[in-house]
Image: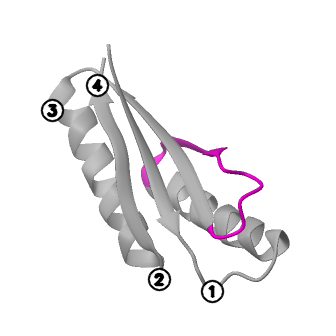
Amino acid sequence: MKVGIAELRIDIPWVQSLKEKRMIAKSIIAKTKNMFGVSIAETAEQDTLKTLVLGIAAVGNNAAFVLTVLEKTIGYIQSITEGDVVVLQKEWL
């Protein structure tokens, strides 16, 4: 069994409230879960207004599959958000 993890930081400078940030996070999380079946959650900077940090985990039977799923997931998140997406960490165990 191989496990892949990634951590993304999304800069969202236009956000005016934590409620708006939570709505953006929930939307990204729900769409990504439905599309790829990965585990995803807001993992840090939860009280920071203009930064969203998401942790993603995928499980599979080989490393190539897990890394492909993570790459596609990251690309998808970049395509559905207007914010700047920075990959903080990506690895497999």
Side (left or right) of 33 relative to 62: right
Q: Which mark is residue 14?
A: 1
The numbered mark, 4 or 3, whose residue comes first in the sequence reads 3
The answer to which of marks 3 and 1 sits earlier in the sequence is 1
Disc 4/disc 2 C-alpha distance (Å): 28 Å
Q: Mark 4 vs mark 1: which is more N-terminal?
A: 1
Question: Where does label 3 land, which residue?
Answer: 64
Extreme residue in the left direction:
64
Residue 46 counted in the magenta span: yes
24, above or below 69, in the image: below
Q: Quadrant of residue 78?
A: bottom left
Q: Say which quadrant the N terminus sits in.
A: top left
Decide: few, some or many residues near mark 1? Use Cα within 10 Å; few <14, some 14-19, many ≥20: few
* Mark 4: few/some/many CA within 10 Å (<14, 14-19, 20+): some
Label 4 or label 2, whichever comes before in sequence order: 2
> Marks 2/1: CA distance?
10 Å
Q: How far is mark 2 from mark 3, CA to CA?
A: 29 Å
Give coordinates of residue 62: x percent, y percent: 20, 22
For disc 4, the marked residue is 92
- Tally the marks: 4
Q: Amino acid at mark 4?
A: Trp
Q: Secondary structure at mark 2?
A: loop
Q: Is residue 66 left or right of residue 44?
A: left
- The boundaries of the magenta stretch are 36-50
